[in-house]
Amino acid sequence: MKVLQSSFAQGFIKMANDGYMQGWHERNGGNLSYRIKEAEIASVAEDISFHDKYMPIGTTVPGLAGEFFMVTGSGKFFGNCSMDPENCCGIIQVDDSGEQYRTVWGLKNGGRPTSELPTHLMNHEVKKEATGGAHRVIYHCHATNLIALTFVLPLEDEVFTRELWESATECPVVFPAGVGVVEWMVPGGREIAVATSKLMRIYDVAVWAHHGMFCSGETFDLTFGLAHTVEKAAEILVKVRSMTSKKQQTITPADFRKLAVDFGVKLDERFLY
Ligand code: 13P
Ligand code: ZN
């Protein structure tokens, strides 16, 4: 089978387009990666070529040795992924040391994987271990309202989690572990990758101050749905704060504890101050 006929590639391209339609991917903003299953890469073997040379990842991910990933390309526009997937996206393989990658499909005309490859791969490594291999999707988007909140809320996990949970009843059910916050850092390198992957050990969502968010999930739908839920809550909070500095009423810590019992989720008391 050709890569573009596979359901994983089609799911990848659909998600990129869905994010673009939300307005979270101006120009080349955002990036997406998917840890491909063994059976999936075997099914597209006819389309894979091992002639490219290895390049440094910029960090070390021994837990991903030999694994294949579908990734968006650096400088590529999400809005073009569906029209021109072989230029905008690619498949890479990590070498046995976890220090290098090679392109085995796509990224035509000298394209390179996203500049956030260190963060994507370090998040994948952490999540693969933490979820027994269940999580396969890492998504970075420039979600407008969440970014706006990073200018007005303290950059603390407890505050962001609680404020987002209060903004929509479904939030503590969709992300019961909460969200982590990374202070402003230079993007594209190992340092921000280390800080983000440390948070990804605990959370499925990491907010990048004045930049965007990273989400992790099992499937394209669940990961996109997570980002969508976070951004929707952020939008509600921006509207509330635009109307008033004081909420007339809200969901209380006692309400969250009741919700946790009925929905069978564990909510850390750290967020129920
Ligand atoms: P890339 O085009 O290299 O993926 O960078 C986009 C981005 O959002 C950087 O954080
Ligand atoms: Zn970005």
Image (cartoon, helix red, strand yellow):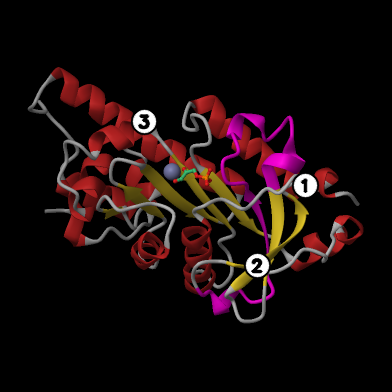
**Of the numbered discs in the image, which one, if any, rests on residue 101?**
2
Q: 182 or 54, which is in the foreground?
A: 54
Q: 180 or 167, which is in the foreground?
A: 180
In the picture, measured across the screen, residue 239 lies left or right of residue 43, that is: left
Residue ID for mark 3 = 144
**Label 2 crowding class (10 Å Cα cut-off): few <14, some 14-19, many 20+?**
many
Q: Position of residue 168 (x, y in %)?
A: 31, 35
Q: Give the range drawn in magenta.
A: 60-89
Q: Where is residue 97 in the image (x, y as percent from the top left)?
A: 61, 81
Residue type of the residue flagged with mark 2: Tyr
> Where does ligand 2 appear, by image quarter?
top left
Q: Is residue 81 in the magenta section?
A: yes
**Label 1 crowding class (10 Å Cα cut-off): few <14, some 14-19, many 20+?**
few
Which of disc 1 and disc 2 is earlier in sequence? 1
Which of disc 3 and disc 2 is earlier in sequence? 2
Q: In this view, does 217 lie above or below 64?
A: above
**Of the numbered discs in the image, which one, if any, rests on residue 204?**
none
Residue shown at the point (76%, 46%) measured from the top left: 108
